[in-house]
Image (cartoon, coloured by chain):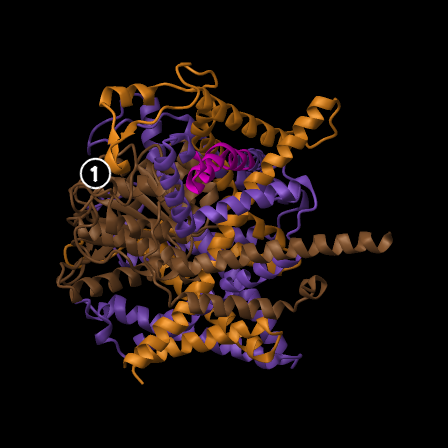
């Protein structure tokens, strides 16, 4: 058996072991589950040094010797202080000193929270601006946006003159304005449902809130549909792995 | 039909149906006609119009757990860039396994190109792998601030040369002074790392995204507000890319023929000049139709069953 | 400030020493000893000081990014020897120089803390084996898999990083047994199981959709309709065939308005004008929450957070 085939074979076996849980909880599944956990933990420990600490910490602290075209880099000894601070995290297992484990976590959280103001504006600034949409039509020559082509022989599309196309594209027609209005209404209603989570007085506000909840459901519907696609894609990929990659290779060997 | 019996069917029957349907689906014809999503058209047009002399930044944040979708994305992206000889730099944030998985894809596409007699991409010459940056926030902030400092300590092997070279001494990154010197940054992700990237970099560099179906809905606001210039979401997005790689946009191989893909806002965008187009996503897309139909049927039958049962209960009361 | 130019080696200073030199070792070990002294000193901290100590660390860490945001960034990087224009410019340069170091801190500390999870996983399973609790055999399986991955993973790394100056191991045909084992465990087993684990959810979604996705209220009806239209539009083939039918109808009747009935058009309109703004509102709400939470953590106001 060649190496690639063995690799595919093991992949198929462990996939099937995991799938056996669909029938019911069983020992084979539990075995595979523990192999999975063990490998994942082992791999994390490899990566923590290989891709993170070695590159980001060790090489900066100890420097690098000249190698090929790369000149020697001096080491910055201050990086060493991070080791004791990191070790403080492990006091979490001590009854008396577990408060110290909050120091490294506090530093990480502090660094995260300090970024939030800038992050907030960069994320939502453009979106707030984009939500301000024109809701009054600029022209009444037509209710809907005219098409930018005519039909030639046999239904083939022939584009209108570029000036006319530009004119159509620069105008806001009634149906477009209406769409924009619905857009703005949806944003405001759904957001208000978040904002006014307390008891509301007044019929209008209550109705508006209910409307907001419906709009949220439209959003959740889209999220659901898209998530379903994602999960099915994974099953399809598993089946392709078993039937096409593994059996394909087995049969053409 | 006995609806109440159907209401109580064992879940394992449903599982078997799904397994059989997704298996059989793989053997159906796979070139399904399609009208790509507007966001995917934007992404394809953007990629095909990139200048050849500037590098593309790829942030690859997925592992094999979402292979069904994101592997198709990275494959399509690599095929497009390689066919246009655009250099790229690739790295991963957050997930430690992501870097290795991305490298595997590059290796496999290189092998595929070698077989087809096409130019292969060489490490340190045509592309650079920077490794993993465990903290996505910090990495993004550093890149925004000063890319030379953010990546300055990283070194790369150069194909055919002994030893390692600082990444900015290579042909890929030599002319890069700031992140804005990249022609495009594409984030391929299965998690919220796209939010982190948009927050820190979308006002500095043209940004696009390829994501799983789970992440895709959250990209819509970014796309509408212009923070993302285009995106491909999920398996559908991957198939959209492959479809346009084969057919282009507003492009007809013979004059007078209607183009397969049209879009008002672009001129003619050709298909990829060389290499494969239909691949992984095309293999899966037909099966996705079957699976989604199955789900819709399940919902419909569940509801019809409920109504029938309700009607019966009412009738019983009378 | 610690200077570290990207390419040319930086000039010697108080902060750096030649790589792997004896002086560097002395400085590094000295720093670690100093840090450990701080560590043990803190164990004697009186109870009333514990909270302020943690809060100070948190506040100072957050303050850096807040100041970075407030102080104007220099317009262009300075050439060597070029002096700052004024104190504000100098501060801007200082902050932009310091940023990569500070960002390093978060990355390195997160990496050190990653070990915590592994450590507690290990203690649980070793205890299970020692006490021969139910299913302790599985704990052995877990430990063996972990040790195998660890051993072959590091051996593979050492071979590729230090023993392979020509990069021959990039090509899988040159692999030795060690490289193959590392690849087998990671790419052959771990990655495939990762995919299989996540794909299990699809089965549960199908079963749940059949049993529980019912039209019972306005909300569930709206949700279902929205999901249905989206799923139909995801089926490119269905949408395309429908579109062809509409095209034929348009040409037959000459009424271009019918084009709006294509699934792609309907789904697009719905996505652009209702789904996207709804998602935007959801994210906007979440974003406001994160902002408030960030400010509360930074200022030590969050109960149950770092300050509790």
Residue visible at 23% across and 58% down?
B276
Badge 1: residue crowd in 10 Å (few <14, some 14–19, many ≥20): some
Q: Position of residue B136 (x, y in %)?
A: 41, 47
The one nearer the camera, C161 or B72, is: B72
* Residue B73 located left or right of residue C11: right
Q: Position of residue C151 (x, y in %)?
A: 39, 75
Q: For the N terminus of chain B, give its image quadrant.
A: bottom right
Q: Is residue C177 above or below residue B302?
A: below
Residue C262 colored in magenta in the image: yes
Q: Which quarter of the figure has residue B255?
A: top left
* Residue B152 located left or right of residue C290: left
Q: Which residues are magenta?
A: C260-282
Q: Colour of chain A?
A: orange
- What residue does disc 1 label? B268
- Residue found at the very far right of the displayed protein: B318
- Chain to which the residue tagged by mark 1 belongs: B
Q: Which quarter of the figure has residue B74?
A: bottom left
* Residue C49 located left or right of residue C101: right
Q: Position of residue A162 (x, y in %)?
A: 23, 23
The one nearer the camera, B227 or B293, is: B293
Q: Colour of chain B?
A: brown
The one nearer the camera, A15 or A213, is: A213
Residue visible at 59% across and 35% down?
A215
Residue C238 colored in magenta in the image: no
């Amino acid at each position: 058996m060649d190496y690639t085939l063995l690799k595919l074979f093991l992949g198929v076996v462990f996939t099937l072991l995991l799938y056996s849980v669909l029938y019911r909880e069983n020992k084979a599944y539990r075995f595979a589950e523990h192999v999975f956990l063990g490998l994942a933990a082992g791999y994390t420990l490899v990566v923590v040094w290989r891709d993170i600490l070695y590159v980001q910490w060790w090489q900066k602290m100890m420097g690098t010797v000249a190698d090929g075209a790369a000149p020697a880099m001096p080491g910055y000894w201050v990086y060493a202080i991070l080791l004791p601070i990191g070790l403080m995290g492990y006091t979490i297992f001590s009854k008396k000193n577990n408060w110290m484990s909050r120091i490294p976590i506090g530093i990480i959280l502090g660094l995260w929270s300090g970024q939030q103001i800038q992050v907030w504006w960069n994320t939502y600034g453009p979106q707030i601006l984009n939500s301000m949409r024109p809701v009054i039509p600029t022209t009444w020559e037509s209710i809907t946006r005219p098409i930018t082509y005519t039909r030639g022989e046999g239904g083939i599309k022939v584009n209108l003159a570029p000036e006319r196309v530009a004119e159509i594209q620069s105008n806001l027609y009634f149906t477009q304005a209406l769409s924009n209005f619905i857009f703005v209404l949806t944003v405001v209603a759904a957001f208000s449902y978040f904002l006014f989570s307390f008891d509301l007085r007044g019929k209008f506000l209550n109705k508006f809130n209910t409307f907001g909840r419906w709009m949220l459901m439209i959003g959740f519907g889209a999220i659901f549909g898209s998530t379903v696609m994602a999960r099915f894609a994974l099953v399809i990929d598993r089946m392709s792995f078993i039937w096409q990659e593994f059996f394909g290779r087995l049969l053409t060997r | 039909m006995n609806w109440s019996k159907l209401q109580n069917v064992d879940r394992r029957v449903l599982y078997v149906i799904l397994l059989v349907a997704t298996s059989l689906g793989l053997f159906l014809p796979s070139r399904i006609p399609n009208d790509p999503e507007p966001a995917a058209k934007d992404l394809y047009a953007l990629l095909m119009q990139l200048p050849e002399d500037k590098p593309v930044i790829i942030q690859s944040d997925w592992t094999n757990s979402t292979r069904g979708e994101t592997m198709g994305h990275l494959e399509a992206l690599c095929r497009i860039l390689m066919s246009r000889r655009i250099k790229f730099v690739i790295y991963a944030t957050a997930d430690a396994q992501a870097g290795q998985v991305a490298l595997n894809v590059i290796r496999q596409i290189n092998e595929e190109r070698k077989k087809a007699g096409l130019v292969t991409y060489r490490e340190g010459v045509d592309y650079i792998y920077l490794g993993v940056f465990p903290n996505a926030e910090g990495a993004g902030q550093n890149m925004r601030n000063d890319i030379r400092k953010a990546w300055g300590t990283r070194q790369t092997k150069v194909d055919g040369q002994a030893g390692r070279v600082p990444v900015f001494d290579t042909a890929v990154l030599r002319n890069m002074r700031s992140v804005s010197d990249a022609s495009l940054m594409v984030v391929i992700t299965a998690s919220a790392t796209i939010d982190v990237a948009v927050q820190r970099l979308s006002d500095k560099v043209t940004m696009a995204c390829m994501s799983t179906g789970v992440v895709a809905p959250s990209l819509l606001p970014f796309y509408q507000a212009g923070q993302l210039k285009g995106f491909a979401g999920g398996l559908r997005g991957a198939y959209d890319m492959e479809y346009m790689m084969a057919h282009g946009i507003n492009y007809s191989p013979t004059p007078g023929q209607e183009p397969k893909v049209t879009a008002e806002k672009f001129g003619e965008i050709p298909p990829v000049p060389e290499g494969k187009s239909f691949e992984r996503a095309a293999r899966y897309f037909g099966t996705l139709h079957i699976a989604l139909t199955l789900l819709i049927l399940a919902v419909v039958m569940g509801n019809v069953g409920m109504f029938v049962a309700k009607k019966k209960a009412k009738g019983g009361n009378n | 400030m610690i200077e570290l130019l990207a390419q040319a080696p930086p000039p010697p200073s108080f902060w750096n020493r030649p790589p792997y030199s004896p002086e560097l070792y002395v400085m590094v070990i000295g720093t670690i000893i100093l840090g450990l002294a701080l560590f043990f000193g803190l164990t004697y901290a009186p109870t009333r000081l514990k909270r302020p100590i943690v809060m100070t660390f948190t506040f100072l860490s957050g303050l850096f990014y807040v100041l970075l945001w407030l102080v104007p960034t220099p317009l262009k990087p300075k050439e060597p020897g070029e002096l700052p224009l004024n104190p504000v410019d100098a501060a801007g340069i200082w902050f932009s120089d310091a940023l990569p170091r500070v960002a390093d801190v978060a990355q390195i500390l997160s990496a050190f803390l990653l070990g915590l999870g592994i450590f507690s996983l290990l203690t649980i399973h070793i205890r299970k084996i020692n006490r021969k609790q139910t299913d302790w055999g599985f704990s052995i399986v877990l430990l063996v898999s972990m040790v195998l991955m660890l051993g072959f993973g590091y051996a593979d790394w050492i071979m590729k990083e230090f023993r392979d100056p020509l990069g021959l191991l990039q090509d899988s045909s040159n692999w030795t047994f060690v490289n193959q084992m590392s690849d087998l465990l990671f790419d052959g087993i771990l990655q495939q199981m990762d995919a299989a684990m996540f794909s299990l959810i699809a089965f549960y979604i199908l079963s749940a959709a059949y049993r529980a996705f019912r039209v019972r209220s306005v909300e569930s009806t709206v949700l279902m309709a929205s999901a249905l239209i989206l799923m139909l539009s995801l089926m490119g083939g269905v949408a395309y065939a429908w579109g062809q039918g509409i095209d034929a109808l348009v040409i037959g009747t000459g009424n271009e308005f019918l084009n709006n009935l294509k699934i792609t058009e309907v789904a697009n309109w719905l996505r652009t004008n209702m789904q996207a703004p709804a998602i935007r509102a959801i994210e906007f709400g979440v974003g406001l929450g994160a902002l408030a939470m960030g400010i509360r953590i930074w200022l030590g106001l969050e109960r149950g957070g770092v300050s509790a």
